[in-house]
Amino acid sequence: MKKDPRKQERRRKKSGPLAKAAKWLVGLAVVGLVVYAVSQGSGVAYGERDIGVVNFSGLAPDEKQEALEAANSARCTCGCGLTLAGCVSTDLTCPLREDNIQTIRGMVRAADKP
């Protein structure tokens, strides 16, 4: 079945400059939202809520970020391959979990600058 060339021409005419501008605005809005979301993220896989057994409330925001980054970069030594934060957050059976909690608490104390 052959397509009617007049119908194809009418479809092309419908997407004029206003439609193109709307598409660009939507695209720019999506890019803006992605940039905003990335800028608001803490940059750590496991945050304060995930590591609920450790109290971060006494820290200033930059100190909290420092402690969270340290907990998310140091590795658990049991061989699981997780970070300290990941281990404490997700592995309740780790034999070193309590030691890891104490290590993170030490990181919080170290980040607490007078």
Image (tube, helix red, strand yellow):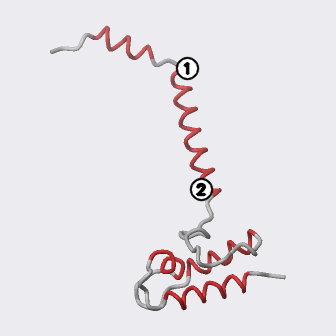
Q: Are marks 1 and 2 in contact (CB under 8 Å)?
A: no
User: Relative to the observer, which residue lies in front, 86 or 10?
Assistant: 86
Residue found 66% across the figure and 85% down from its top: 107
User: Relative to the observer, which residue lies in front, 25 or 108?
Assistant: 108
Please identify the quadrant where the N terminus is shown. top left
Q: Which mark is residue 38?
A: 2
Give the CA distance from mark 1 to mark 2.
Answer: 30 Å
The percent position of residue 67, horizontal first and vertical second, equals: 66, 78
Q: Residues within 10 Å of mark 2 (few under 14, many from 20)?
A: few
Q: Which corner quadrant of the image does residue 54 belong to?
A: bottom right
Q: Which corner quadrant of the image does residue 108 belong to?
A: bottom right
Please identify the quadrant where the C terminus is shown. bottom right
The percent position of residue 72, horizontal first and vertical second, equals: 56, 77
Camera-nearest label, 1 or 2: 2
Q: Which mark is residue 18?
A: 1
For label 1, the SS is helix
Residue found 52% across the figure and 30% down from its top: 23
The percent position of residue 32, horizontal first and vertical second, equals: 61, 44
User: Relative to the observer, which residue lies in front, 29 or 70?
Assistant: 70
Q: Is residue 61 above or below residue 67?
A: above
Amino acid type at mark 1: Leu
Dot placed on the residue nearer the N-terminal end, 1 or 2: 1
Q: Residues within 10 Å of mark 1 (few under 14, many from 20)?
A: few
The percent position of residue 51, horizontal first and vertical second, equals: 57, 74
Residue extending furthest toward the left: 1
Q: Is residue 57 above or below residue 81?
A: above
For label 2, the SS is helix
Residue found 40% across the figure and 17% down from its top: 12
**Left-right relation of 24 to 57:** left
Amino acid type at mark 2: Val
**Left-right relation of 51 to 7:** right
